[in-house]
Image (cartoon, grey):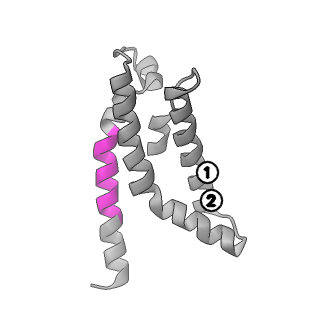
Amino acid sequence: MNHHMRMVREYKKKFFIALALTIPIVIFSETVQELLGYSLPKTIITDYAIFGLSTVVYWYCGLPFLKGLIAELKKRTPGMMTLVSLAISIAYFYSIASSFIIPGKTLYWELQH
């Protein structure tokens, strides 16, 4: 199997893993709950569960973007990988802070975009 086909297969696998993990992340998102008019209890257990799922999405599924960021910055040619990496990193790290350190709404569900 050539490199391109392996890469396509790997991205498909990452996509379906991210899709499966996204469902509970979106369901428990405070913003989505407000938009759709429902409410689920917010507990430290749900915070840790959503944090854990989002961590897998960020590091496993976002790794190609983070690697692309490094490559773009080394070449001094920021592009789409830089933009996506910046967006997912801000959403991820702000959400960690608002889950465990400062008051605020999490943006874990924004990692999925």
Q: Which residues are magenta?
A: 11-22
Q: Residue at x 38, y 18 (%)?
A: 42
Vertical arrangement, residue 34 with respect to residue 26, above or below: above
Q: Is residue 17 one of those drawn in magenta?
A: yes
Q: Judging from the image, what secondary structure is the residue with disc 1 in?
A: helix
Q: Judging from the image, what secondary structure is the residue with disc 2 in?
A: helix
Q: Residue at x 34, y 49 (%)?
A: 18
Check disc 1: other Cα within 10 Å, few if <14, some if 14-19, many if 20+: some
Q: Position of residue 102 (x, y in %)?
A: 59, 24
Total numbered labels:
2
Q: Amino acid at mark 2?
A: Thr
Q: Position of residue 36 (x, y in %)?
A: 40, 20
Q: Residue at x 37, y 48 (%)?
A: 56
User: Residue 98 versus residue 4: which sits nearer the camera?
Assistant: 98
Look at mark 2 in the image and give the residue it sits on. Answer: 82
Q: CA distance from mark 1 to mark 2?
A: 6 Å
Q: Residue 2: which disc?
A: none
Q: Amino acid at mark 1?
A: Leu
Say left or right for 61 vs 72.
Answer: left
Q: Position of residue 38 (x, y in %)?
A: 36, 14
Question: Do the numbered discs 1 and 2 sit on residues whose CB atoms are within 8 Å?
Answer: yes
Residue at the farthest front position: 101
Say left or right for 9 vs 95.
Answer: left
Q: Quadrant of residue 103?
A: top right
Q: Residue at x 31, y 33 (%)?
A: 24
Check disc 2: other Cα within 10 Å, few if <14, some if 14-19, many if 20+: some
Q: Quadrant of residue 39?
A: top left
Q: Position of residue 82 (x, y in %)?
A: 62, 59
Look at mark 1 in the image and give the residue it sits on. Answer: 86
